[in-house]
Amino acid sequence: MTDGFISCPKDAEPMERITLGTVAIDRCPACGGVWLDRGELDALRRTLLKDEHRATLDALDELGTREPDERPQPLLCPRDHTRMSTHRHHAQRHIEFDTCTKCGGMFFDAGELSDLTEFTLFERIRAMLPHRS
Ligand SMILES: [Zn+2]
Ligand SMILES: [Zn+2]
């Protein structure tokens, strides 16, 4: 399921594979968005406990060049083309991400992924997910 390259759900650019520690994630070179397959968020957080990888992730987020979109239409899952659900979280800082209820994949806009290095925020996001794995 994690094999093969996918297109960005926002702008259809082919996403590039980036390896953070032991986790391979897909990142859009155009908008800086990041796609995580089901289970990769947990794997990523374990990886992010190491400071060297955290710095890499921060650098990735800095490459984002676009302002957040208003999202007039739901995004479509790049793997199975299911309409994705948008989740917003406003407790401490703004964060928004999209999940696919079919395959459990998640899409983060540029600049959002580094927020996941904050443990409490990660746990809140996890609680918001429709699937527990
Ligand atoms: Zn993109
Ligand atoms: Zn999907």
Image: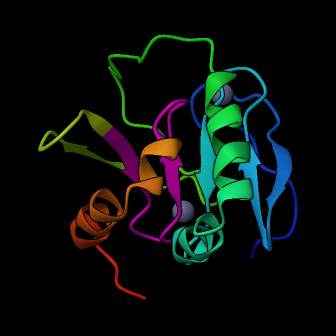
Q: Is residue 70 above or below residue 50?
A: above
- Percent across and percent down for residue 114 are 51, 43
- Percent across and percent down for residue 29 are 78, 27
Find residue 1 and report its image quarter: bottom right
Q: Is residue 74 above or below residue 103?
A: above
Query: Ligand 2 sits in which quadrant?
Result: bottom right
Q: Is residue 122 left or right of residue 111?
A: left
Q: Is residue 84 visible?
A: no
Q: Given the current orientation, which residue lies at the most extreme left position? A: 91
Find residue 12 and report its image quarter: top right
Q: Is residue 123 above or below residue 75?
A: below
Q: Given the current orientation, which residue lies at the most extreme bottom position? A: 133
Q: Residue at x 22, y 35 (%)?
A: 93
Pick whichever, 102 or 99, lies toward us. Answer: 99
Pick whichever, 27 or 121, lies toward us. Answer: 121
Magenta-colored stretch includes residue 115: no
- Percent across and percent down for residue 36 are 60, 59
Q: Is residue 59 left or right of residue 42?
A: right
Find residue 19 and report its image quarter: bottom right
Q: Residue at x 66, y 28 (%)?
A: 32
Magenta-colored stretch includes residue 112: yes
Q: Is residue 25 visible?
A: yes
Question: Which residue range is magenta in the image?
Answer: 96-113
Pick whichever, 102 or 18, lies toward us. Answer: 18
Q: Residue at x 23, y 72 (%)?
A: 127
Task: Give the tally of numbered discs.
Answer: 0
Q: Residue at x 19, y 44 (%)?
A: 89
